[in-house]
Amino acid sequence: MKQQTDNNDQIIEQAGQDVIILLQNWKKRTKRLKIYRFSLCLALLFSFTALTAALYYQIDSSIPSVLNVRADQEQSFYLGVPAAAEIVSVSENGESNIPAGAVEIDLSKTVTLKTSQEANYRMMVKLFGFLPFKEVNIQVIQDQSLIPVGAPIGIYVKTDGVLVIGTGEFKGHDGASYCPGRYVLKSGDYIRCVNGHSVTEKEEFVRLIEESKGAVVTLTLERGGETMNVDVTPVQDANGDYKIGVWVRDNAQGVGTMTYIDSEGNFGALGHGINDVDTSTLMQMEDGTLYQTSIVDIKKGKDGNPGEMTGMIVYSDENILGAITSNSVKGIFGVCNEKALNLGVQDALPIGLKQEIEKGPAQILCTVEDESKYYDVEITAVHLDHDNVNRGIELTVTDPELLAITGGIVQGMSGSPIVQNGKIIGAVTHVLVQDSTKGYGIFIETMLDH
């Protein structure tokens, strides 16, 4: 009887342990299920956020912040976005003479506009017809024709002051290492004066530092758009010369392509600015000169290794093509002389606005042999409101002849005009390093608005 009782106790005890194990397993499964549900919700939230951000960016980049339209001409454009918009006029006092709600358009469909010469407009975009999304400035411009050039040019630019590239140590007269300019000057600084004396050339700057004989000198410089004075004490090097330990530059040279000549004899080229090779900053220019050049060698582009056009430039008066008056992120611009005007052998073409550009066949005009010539390309994407002004157009070189000579787009072709449907629509600016057949371009209207 006692043995039976013990057996019953053992059974009860075992059952209790089984229940405890079941409870523990249930708690573990419940905890795992909660973690799984939380992870799933987190993944769904992340996916939804990423999808929403991608959709927002796509719609935003499809709607230009600025839309140029020709005066007194009926024009159509198609944005194809799920948005409605209201157009109001913009006057000097900020008031509109168009009643609220009088001009509403559906941006998912083709829109046709005709504007007068005098007025400018603002388009208030609402996503899905009710969510305030974006304001678009509609600018009325005069129609314009340009001569596409596509000829190689030699470029010489004089900096506005002396550009600081960087700092470096040197051995002093006592054998120790010195760099007085460190922590005082920065890469990208433009030195304008030494002790009140204006400097425009590297040799002049070196001479004024040497003449200090180790006394403190005051440098007037521009940094990030702000003018300031800094003091630095030159130190005598092992050769007895006084230095402050900075590398400087006072000019830049290179080869590019002229894009266009307008009716007044002005030119535009490159489609991007001239940046310093070491600091990667846009060079502040005092003046510049355009020279005639000839291509002497072409290094064919390969995937991961962009090619290059090598030009021979003779810096003589008889080779001058004109004066460079502006270096901006949109290109270099200036005035042609008679010799440069003779480069414009092509017929003038009307400009094509960005909303008129289509995916599909186009041509670029460039010089890779003896004369400028049109070569076939394919426009693969048009970004009406790209963050980078130099990359509004994506294109691929399809012309077998150009591919055989250059492998696609190479350095030196920047500025080659892009033509589609009988209109000049932009200029080549960059090559895709991973694929030399592909590249980018700037809208011609962007270049003209420099």
Image (cartoon, rainbow, N blue to C red):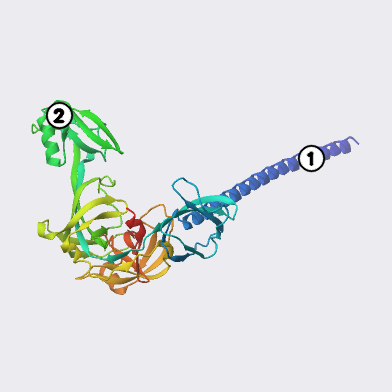
Callout 2 environment at 10 Å: few (<14), some (14 to 19), or many (20+)? many
Residue in front for this viewpoint, 3 or 345? 345
Q: Which residue is mark 2?
A: 235
Question: Visible in this render: residue 166?
Answer: yes
Residue that sits furthest to the top in the current view: 215
Question: Visible in this render: residue 293?
Answer: no
Residue in front for this viewpoint, 368 or 337? 337
* 2 w.r.t. 48: above or below: above
Instruction: State how far apart marks 2 and 1 are (Cα).
Output: 91 Å
Instruction: Give the tally of numbered discs.
Output: 2
Mark positioned earlier in the residue sequence (2 or 1): 1
Determine the image quadrant of residue 115: bottom left
For mark 1, give the secondary structure.
helix
Residue in front for this viewpoint, 295 or 177? 295
Hey, what amino acid is under mark 2?
A: Val
Q: Which residue is mark 1?
A: 14
Determine the image quadrant of residue 220: top left
| Quarter occupied by the N terminus | top right
Q: Residue at point 67% right, 44% down?
A: 34
* 281 w.r.t. 58: above or below: above
Q: Which mark is residue 88?
A: none
* 232 w.r.t. 46: above or below: above
Hey, what amino acid is under mark 1?
A: Gln
